[in-house]
Image (cartoon, grey):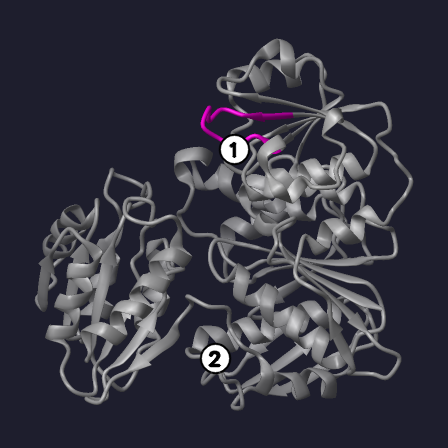
Amino acid sequence: MALLHSSSRLLFHTSSILYTLNNRKGEKQRSSRGNSVVMCLAKDSRQDLNGETVAVIGLGVSGRSVVKLALSRGANVLALDSNPSCVPLEEDSGFEGYDLNRVQTELGPHKRETLLKASQLVLSPGVPVTHPDIAAAIQAGVPAFSELGFAAAALPGNIKVAAVTGTNGKSTVTTFTSQILRNAGVRTFVAVVEVSSYQLELPGSFHPKAAVILNLTPDHLERHKSMEAYGSIKCRVFSRMEASDVAIIPQSDVLLRRLAAMSGSQATRAWMGGLPGVQLDKDARRAIVVVPTTGVEARLYLSSLQAVGTHNAHNAGTAALLALSLDVGLQSEDIQAAIPHLKAPPHRMEIVHQDDQGVVWVNDSKATNVDSTSVGIRSIVGKKAVVLLGGQAKVGVGSGGLGFGVLVESLQSHRAVVLFGASGLAIEQELRHAGLSITCTYTELFADAVQLAGSLAQPGDAVLLSPGCASFDQFKNFEHRGQVFADLAKVVST
């Protein structure tokens, strides 16, 4: 009847959308935008938390929607945020119609005595479970969940869930999977959920029917400390899965294979890069998909895929495997019919402008780590690029470097590198030390960097923003950075 497509970092976010399918296959009506996942869950009138007190820690967009879900489930709420300038819920127009008499808001440092009053804790992704007062409350016996775990407890049992995690490609595979299901007019309730490592720290009863770990490369190590720990947390996505469920990992990733085997999951294994699972030919033009639990097989032609880059052909193949693994009646022809309609989300190898000199401006602002940037650079074929790198670099692996030296081989065939932001100079040093010989120059401000990149580009080149860094030194988030780039591209090239 409906498809819930949600990014778990936006599990309760206003960009989540509820799709309703009409009686005839393929006729879809899109609901109004809003907290649609919450609205769907709020229809459950069990009031299963009636009389309990839920402490919601972190009052960003998703945290506020957790508060709404807790209220809809009958709970009293302790709404906590360490930022004293956070807008109180009482002043948030989004809470009109909610009973705020059942909400107690505390801003500033978390108080242990407040946390100990709660029946359960719900942690927003930015709140580490290692925070001393939170850890003390958990040790004292207060159950704790991520927002993902909290939502999972309210999901009706008839909803089949596809979960997507990994370091890179999560949003694209989540989007492709939902587009396949929508295009086919699936007649059941399905949730397609992007899951972060932070949310898998406390996953609660989250139980996907099909789940994939796309890849595992260095990221978030300032929180997880090691690749082993990071991978173990990712594998928690499989922890409650059963033999009738499908767990998908890259066949070539030795660490993930070992950690998945240690996870205790009973799920049936499928492979990216092998069968059963999904396997592409060497040109990424055809894919074979085999579901291990049902034996359903699909042979797909990917030449009609509109998304840029061979990595998106692999993303499409993985999305096909996920969709088929949900066992909702899809066949090979349903997947094939969807391929031409698959569109990657914004800020991921998105062509935002082409000027009258034939210079193509490509926004890959979502590339916030080195591995993702490497994929972006290799996706530019048949032309030279001026590559924009920089921002706030993440912790690397090994001897204290940022890890950008691995990009040199793929950069050497391009026009130039322009660096910017808080980590730009350090990245420049790494690239030069690793032997980069093309033009490589630094300017602090992003707008100046885009202007410089435009001046270095020759007719027919590409200007690629694939920064390999977080955006918070100069922007609200990667979306903000990407939008500024798109706007500047039109100005610079006039």
Residue drawn at x 55%, y 86% as measured from the top left = 302
Q: Which mark is residue 307?
A: 2
Given residues 407 and 149, the one toward you in this image is 149
Q: Is residue 88 magenta?
A: yes
What residue range appears in magenta? 79-89
Q: Which residue is mark 1?
A: 87
Q: Main secondary structure of the magenta part?
A: loop
Quarter assignment of residue 182: bottom right
Mark yes or no: residue 185 visible: yes
Residue contact between numbered discs 2 and 1, judged by CB atoms under 8 Å? no
Dot 1 amino acid type: Val
Given residues 37 and 382, the one toward you in this image is 37
From this view, report whether residue 279 is shown above or below residue 2.
below
Residue drawn at x 82%, y 63% as measured from the top left = 189
Quadrant assignment for the N terminus: bottom right
From this view, report whether residue 445 is shown above or below residue 364.
above
Q: Point out residue 141 in the picture as x, y percentages from the top left corner.
A: 72, 16
* Spatial CA span between label 2 and label 1: 39 Å
Mark yes or no: residue 276 visible: no
Residue drawn at x 57%, y 75% as measured from the top left = 316
Q: Is residue 15 magenta?
A: no
Q: Point out residue 451 in the picture as x, y percentages from the top left corner.
A: 15, 67
Dot 2 amino acid type: Ala
Q: Earlier in the sequence, mark 2 or mark 1?
A: 1
